[in-house]
């Protein structure tokens, strides 16, 4: 296949696999709340929701293995435990969440069907795609992504070119920080680790492609996918800002429902009555491609742990889809509540592993990996416990950890340990 064509196919696949329902719903509400400051929020959101995930793809381009390679410098045992946790969490939470979101936002308002029926049909189609593993990138890139992109461009383009759009006043105190935090809470870094592994294994179906060719191909694809993600996120935020005055949102509703109302409101304002039908297709596509990427990645991982057994791949895919049907019966908001304490534990470690794997080799020895990951783990625990128990002592502890109120208490300690360990190693070599 022509390298340029292959680059764009992988870029489209990455974009489609990244652009899940949660990410589709976030930008419009951010734009709605930020008003005239939407472009500042977009910058902050891009740093955490686009740049870090694309670094994850760059890390995969260097490692060209699977998720185990991300943590091998800490220890092989840690890497296995981390990989198992990532994929179990992905199967248990984000994958069923896509089905719940599809039902609540796209299917039920139109057809009023039961969640069980939606989940059965949804995960049956997911399973068909996942079991056709060798064709996954082409199926997603050639068919699903163009349709998803076309619908997004239609909504954004018509909306922004409309003369009726009116910019609203901003409601956010610190727009840049709000954008950073909302991007952080997309948990896209985990998506990068999972989706990147899917791309690597898909490329390995062509044994003639060299390590260097794959690295260049993946890096280019990641950059293009990141650029498209930025354009789409910024466009949706702009729509939220310009059409905010035409959408009424009940602040007593959950944040997820507020996001859905804003997105549905701006699509209706931009495309009229046709907007709801377009939105339903858009959400269903965004959710579906995400679920396919998660389950294919998990099946690949457990297949690799079991001596490349295709039977294990098939069984994992079936179990993941059945589990998705069961958990998909729960309310979308309920799934989010269960997910948060688990994600607060694993997400900071994932970000740290991504960043360490893209830094120059001379700065990231095995000792650096061990100490930085350990520090991240320790300083993430207060965030996890705060979701599980209410304690004055815990709140007092969090109050002395900088940025802990933003669930970022691990950041400065990890940076300090990174610098200290590198300084210690250089000093030791000189003596």
Image (cartoon, helix red, strand yellow):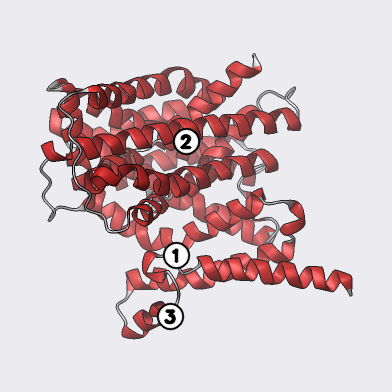
> How far apart are labels 1 and 2 at the CA level?
28 Å
* Residue 245, x across and y down, in percent: 13, 39
Q: Is residue 323 visible?
A: no
The residue located at (80%, 68%) in the rendering is 426
Give the residue at mark 3: 400
Of marks 3 and 2, which one's residue comes earlier in the chain? 2
* Residue 50, x across and y down, in percent: 47, 42
The residue located at (43%, 26%) in the rendering is 128
Of marks 1 and 3, which one's residue comes earlier in the chain? 3
Q: Are marks 3 and 2 in contact (CB under 8 Å)?
A: no
Q: Nearer the viewer, residue 116 or 383?
A: 383
Element assignment for label 3: loop
Give the residue at mark 2: 293
Say the numbered circle drawn on residue 408: 1
Is 161 left, or right, of 164 in this rendering?
Answer: right
Task: Judge the density around disc 2: few (<14), some (14-19), many (≥20) Cα neighbours within 10 Å.
Answer: many
Task: Judge the density around disc 1: few (<14), some (14-19), many (≥20) Cα neighbours within 10 Å.
Answer: some
Task: Judge the density around disc 3: few (<14), some (14-19), many (≥20) Cα neighbours within 10 Å.
Answer: few
Q: Is residue 350 visible?
A: yes
């Amino acid at each position: 296949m022509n390298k340029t064509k292959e680059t764009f196919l992988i870029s489209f696949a990455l974009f489609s696999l990244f652009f899940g329902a949660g990410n589709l719903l976030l930008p419009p509400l951010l734009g709605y709340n930020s008003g005239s400051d939407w472009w500042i929020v977009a910058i902050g959101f891009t740093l955490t929701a686009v740049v870090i995930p694309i670094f994850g793809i760059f890390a995969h381009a260097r490692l060209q293995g699977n998720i185990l390679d991300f943590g091998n410098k800490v220890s092989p045992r840690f890497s296995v435990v981390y990989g198992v946790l990532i994929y179990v969490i992905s199967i248990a939470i984000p994958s069923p969440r896509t089905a719940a979101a599809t039902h609540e936002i796209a299917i039920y308002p139109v057809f009023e069907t039961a969640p069980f029926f939606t989940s059965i049909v949804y995960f049956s189609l997911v399973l068909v795609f996942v079991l056709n593993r060798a064709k996954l990138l082409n199926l997603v890139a050639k068919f699903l992504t163009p349709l998803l992109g076309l619908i997004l461009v239609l909504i954004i383009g018509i909306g922004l070119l409309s003369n009726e759009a009116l910019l609203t006043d901003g409601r956010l105190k610190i727009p840049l920080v709000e954008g950073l935090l909302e991007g952080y809470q997309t948990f896209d870094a985990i998506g990068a680790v999972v989706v990147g592994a899917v791309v690597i294994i898909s490329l390995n179906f062509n044994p003639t492609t060299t390590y260097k060719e794959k690295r260049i191909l993946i890096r280019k694809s990641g950059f293009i996918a990141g650029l498209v993600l930025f354009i789409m996120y910024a466009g949706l935020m702009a729509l939220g800002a310009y059409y905010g005055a035409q959408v009424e949102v009940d602040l007593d509703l959950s944040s997820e429902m507020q996001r859905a109302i804003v997105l549905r409101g701006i699509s209706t304002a931009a495309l009229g009555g046709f907007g709801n039908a377009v939105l339903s297709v858009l959400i269903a596509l965004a959710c579906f491609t995400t679920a396919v990427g998660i389950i294919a990645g998990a099946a690949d991982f457990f297949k690799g742990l079991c001596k490349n057994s295709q039977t294990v791949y098939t069984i994992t895919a079936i179990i993941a889809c059945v589990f998705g049907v069961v958990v998909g019966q729960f309310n979308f908001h309920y799934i989010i509540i269960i997910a948060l304490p688990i994600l607060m534990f694993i997400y900071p470690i994932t970000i740290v592993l991504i960043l360490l794997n893209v830094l120059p080799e001379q700065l990231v020895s095995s000792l650096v990996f061990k100490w930085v990951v350990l520090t991240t783990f320790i300083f993430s625990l207060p965030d996890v416990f705060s979701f599980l128990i209410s304690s004055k002592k815990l709140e007092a502890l969090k109050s002395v950890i900088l940025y802990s109120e933003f669930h970022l208490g691990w950041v400065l300690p990890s940076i300090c340990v990174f610098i200290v360990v590198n300084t210690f190693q250089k000093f030791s070599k000189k003596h």
